[in-house]
Image (cartoon, rainbow, N blue to C red):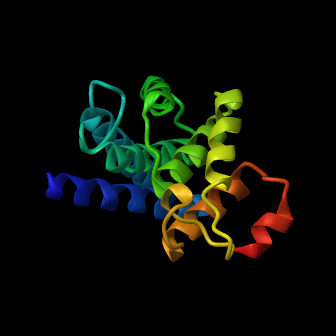
Amino acid sequence: MNIMMNNLNRLIISLILIFNTCAPIYTQQHNEAIERGLSWLRMTQNNTGSWGRKEPHIASAVIDTCNVLNTLHYLKTLDISYWQAIDWLARATSTYCIPLSHKIESLSLSGTYTAYLANLIKTLVGYQTEEGGFANLGHYEATLLDTLFALRALKAVNYHDIKELNKA
């Protein structure tokens, strides 16, 4: 399973790099590489709509699925696989800061579940500590990664309370 996840992570990074760095000089070879990668992603999607590990590893599946969703979004490949994953993501429960941040960012990019997204944002903002960082469930010590992903998610949704974010 770890080999598959390493391959999945490499593929996602490769697709993003190809798309972001080679967009102006796209060639048929790039298009074929992207299509082969997208085909592989479709083949490895779980029957639930998610990617990655299955229950009880929900946090890891949320993060993996969000990474794939964001890649599909940036590649403008919003096909049935994308929408099945969005539906799975909206139903997936993950209360930890990093998966929640990923979930907010991906749902925001999809433009769906806006009322639900507002509740997720409220939850995430509640994870901010007195010092300004973000922590799992807001009860633990803030960490760099929790704070980094929380800020990225809040930026993705154009969170309006900049005073709160400046504490981080």
In this rendering, would 94 be left or right of 110?
left
Which x, y percent locates residue 2?
Answer: 16, 57
- The residue at 52%/76% (across/down) is 144
The C terminus - image quarter: bottom right
- The residue at 68%/33% (across/down) is 111
Which x, y percent locates residue 117?
Answer: 66, 36
Which x, y percent locates residue 11?
Answer: 33, 56
Q: Quadrant of residue 108?
A: top right
Residue 111 in view here = yes
- Vertical placement of residue 91 versus 54, above or below: above
User: Closest to the observer: 138 or 53?
Assistant: 138
- Vertical placement of residue 83 versus 53, above or below: above
- Vertical placement of residue 140 versus 56, above or below: below
Q: Quadrant of residue 14?
A: bottom left
In this rendering, would 152 be left or right of 40?
right
- The residue at 59%/59% (across/down) is 23
- The residue at 30%/34% (across/down) is 45
User: Closest to the observer: 21 or 141?
Assistant: 141
- Vertical placement of residue 40 versus 27, above or below: above
User: Closest to the observer: 59 or 81?
Assistant: 59
Tally the marks. Answer: 0
Which x, y percent locates residue 100?
Answer: 52, 48
Residue 26 in view here = no
